Amino acid sequence: MKQLTDIGFISKASGFNGEVVFISEGNDLPENARFVFFMLEGKPVPYHLTGQKEKSGNLLLKFEDVDDEAEAKKLAGLRAYAEMEDQDRTGESLSWEELEGYEVTDTRYGSLGPLLSVQEFPGHLVGRCLVNGKEVLFPLLEDFLEEVDEENKILRLQLPEGLLAIYLSGDESS
């Protein structure tokens, strides 16, 4: 999941065609936003934004499949989230998915090879490398991140002690 930013909330339904009144709190709805996300049962659910207009000083939003007042009322009171574009392109603002192909190194083990893929599991992302013909999976957490070298395409991690041994028992460290 990409980084979502809280942009405000839906205050009420407006009219009979499914439009809702959006109240911005700090972060505005991005101009090119295609989706607005609402947390439903603890998970972000995207709603396709099909229209927006100002009316009487309010911003009215229209979503695909929200076609009447009853459906619009279900959104009233919900916090709204949107994907925000990074303004600064530093190593810290890169998403994990953008690091696929970078050489992964661990401070204890050394090179793990290229980051082959980033897989999403409930609650966290997992990186995948192939080390000496063995698949190695490891959590992608900022706590383990030492450095992202964008120029040389190197991802330096300090993985928990013993994690790699689970996969590589019998292999020698470099």
Image (cartoon, rainbow, N blue to C red):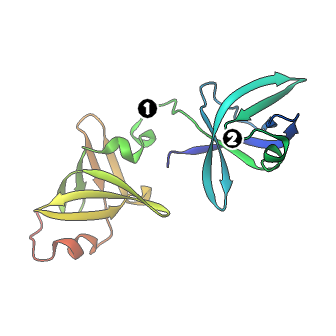
Residue at which label 2 appears: 65
In this rendering, position of residue 79 left or right of residue 148: right
Residue at which label 1 appears: 89
Q: Quadrant of the C terminus?
A: bottom left
Q: Amino acid at mark 2?
A: Asp
Q: Residue at x 49, y 49 (%)?
A: 1
Residue 108 visible in the picture: no
Percent coordinates x, y for residue 30 in the rendering: 63, 29
Question: How would you rate the neighbour count of disc 2 (Cα within 10 Å): few for under 14, some for 14-19, many for 20 or more?
Answer: few
In this rendering, position of residue 57 left or right of residue 22: right
Q: Residue at x 80, y 29 (%)?
A: 59
Q: Circle 1 — which element?
A: loop
Looking at the image, which is closer to me, 142 or 52? 52
Up the image or down, 146 lies above or below 108; here it is: above
Percent coordinates x, y for residue 45 in the rendering: 61, 50
Q: Amino acid at mark 1?
A: Arg
Percent coordinates x, y for residue 13 in the rendering: 85, 40
Kindly report the distance in space between the C-alpha atoms of the residues bearing marks 1 and 2: 36 Å
Q: Circle 2 — which element?
A: loop
Which of marks 2 and 1 precedes in the sequence?
2
Up the image or down, 166 lies above or below 116; here it is: below
